[in-house]
Image: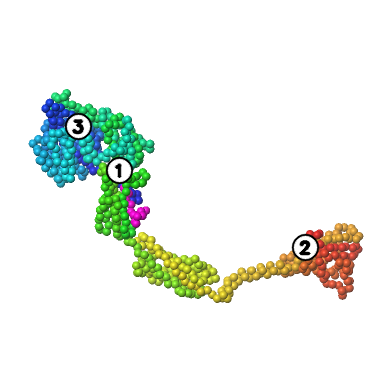
Amino acid sequence: MMTGILFGVGSFASEKPANTIHVVYDDSGSMYKTGDNFYDRWCHARYAMEVFAVMLGPKDTLKVYPMGFEGKKSITVTGSQEAQSRIDAIEAMETAGGNTPFLAVENAYRDLHETQTDGNRWLVVLTDGDFNRMEKDEVDKKLLQFASASKPIKIIFLSIGENSSGITHKPEKGIYFYQSTKNDEMLKQVTQIGNQIFQNLMLPQEYIAKSNKELKLSFDVPMEQIIVFAQGDSVQIGDLKSKQLEPKKTQQVTVKYSTRLPANMEKYRNSIPVDTKLSGSLASFGNQDAISPMGDGEYTVSVSDISNVQIYYKPSVLLDVSIYQTGKKLSDSNKLVSGEYEIELKLLNPITGKEVNSPLLQDVQYRTTITNGGFQESFDTAQNQLAAERGVVDIHSTVELPGYQVLEVTRKIQVLQKAPSLELRADPPEKFNIKDLENEKNVILVTASMENQPLSEELWNNTRLKASTPRNIELEVKKGDVPSTWMIIPKYKADLLSTDTGEIPVTIEANLLYEEQDVNSSLDTSFDIEGLPFLERLMLWVKKNLVKILITLFILFMLIGYILKKRLPKMKPKTIRKQPKPESPTSNFLRKNFLTVILPYIAETGSLTVKSGSTVLAGFELKAKGRNTFTLTNPQRNYDKGLYINGVLLAKDESTKPKAVVLSKNTRIDIENEGKYEFYFHSRQNA
């Protein structure tokens, strides 16, 4: 038994129901001889019993009643026994070689009727003549009574030869009549009866290609089991092979003609013929792991004699039960909402998962039973309608393949009440002042409803509402004072000045969990925010940014101070000559006062010192005047030494001594002392 469930795809491969088969075997003398004529019918019949025994399923039972013992003596073999032991039991079966009493059929039926089994009951009669003291009408009447008993019994009657009047064929009553006039026909009829009882599937000839001593089998569906039954003298069956795998040979057994005669026929042993050609071999194949199926494709098997070979197969497929809505397959159908759906049954390849359509699966019978809302419906088609109502839907789908292979899928689906639509209504104020945002005086009232009714408190609590806007403003959502309401409160983005004014578009979105369903709704609305007058807004801006403004002004003040600042020219005093030459070298130093350099608005000042050795010959205090000019602020220091500016002697009279002299960078200064010095102030690039 194999089970599997995966997203609505699964299979429950039901075992074939157990078969209890009671065979009334004609071992009358006519099966061996009539007058001076001798037959090998008995040999073919015993061989047929061995074939029956080999075909038994694991839970099947075969009981053979030789007719000469009037049903009081029988042998029993079961499918649980090794195949060879079943064959040996049939071979060892004792026969009487007597008459054809109907009492044997009655006793076999009585035992079958009393058998405690839930499976199928079969009464099979093999005979080559009429029953003793029983007319055909009487036999028909009796068999009809057997078939119509409280415990159903199916009857198969095989008439061997031309001397039996047989019975009336009534398949609608479970009575089947076969007739074989020749031995080779009898074997074919026995094979057909065996296939009917054991529900064996014989591979059609179009799937088989014969070549010398090899059979090429083509399957368009994966296989669980393949059985090769070859008949012929000492026939041998090799391994089943394909390019992908080499299936495992799970069973091989040989059936052979019998030479056992009834005691009363031993005297005719040299005259009674034995068909020594009656021989066969049966081999079963499955996948190596005994779980995975054998994939579809081509297989080859070697058979020493291919003149009489039957191939039986057991397909391996999965039953897929899918649910659709408006033609679209639902990926997750374990929970549905009430409404109309479609159910579709398909057979899938268990290896590839693709749908299988094959003549080997013809005459498939589908059946689906749906229980929902206290009502039950059954369908015999692959596609069915499902009107799902709130509650639990039980779906039981089966497909019966040829050979009584039943696949089942059982599903329980939770059906939820379909959620009604969620409607939103917003009541924003027409306009409000931006100052009101600070006190949260104005709100947008949002009301939700379902089917024109306010939400219950439970649904209200299960609803999530959010509001968003592309504008620069915050929107806070709070639950209202009564169920089914919310308040959207506009707030400053960061502060009043950072918040947008004018028309503010708002998108409101609501999500409600209704019986495990997400119900969504959205609404677009807007409101107006009136801004402040310009001057008031400006004052707020100044107040907010006062520190920044002061810092900016200070920086600007400093920058202007540096821009307007008077600086000493970039110059280098240079001694032109001295007469007479000094005894020691002469050096000049121009030093700027540090504070006057770094402070804005303050004119740069500095000092020019002229030294000759350790003697200071002249010291000048300078102050920038602008436009490459500067002021000599202490000319009086050198008055007594004879100070000439561009060749003009400064007066030595106190009343005419200037307190400052304006110079340029190319001014010539001469000082007379013990010697004469001349100085020029040159720009650095010309120094």
The count of marks equals 3
Q: Residue at x 35, y 37 (%)?
A: 298
Within-10-Å neighbours for mark 3: few <14, some 14–19, many 20+? some
Q: Which residue is mark 1?
A: 359
Amino acid type assigned to the residue bearing label 1 in the image: Pro
Image: 507 above or below 191: below
Q: Which disc is residue 18 wearing?
A: none
331 falls in the magenta region: yes
Label pair 2/3, CB-CB below 8 angstroms: no
Q: Quadrant of residue 114?
A: top left
Label 3 sits on a secondary structure element that is: helix
Residue 468 horizontal side relative to residue 410, left or right: right
Visible residue check, residue 331: yes
Q: Residue at x 31, y 53 (%)?
A: 343
| Image quarter hosting the C terminus | bottom right
287 falls in the magenta region: no
Amino acid type assigned to the residue bearing label 2 in the image: Lys
Q: CA distance from mark 2 to mark 3?
A: 139 Å
Q: Which disc is residue 570 wearing?
A: 2
Within-10-Å neighbours for mark 1: few <14, some 14–19, many 20+? few
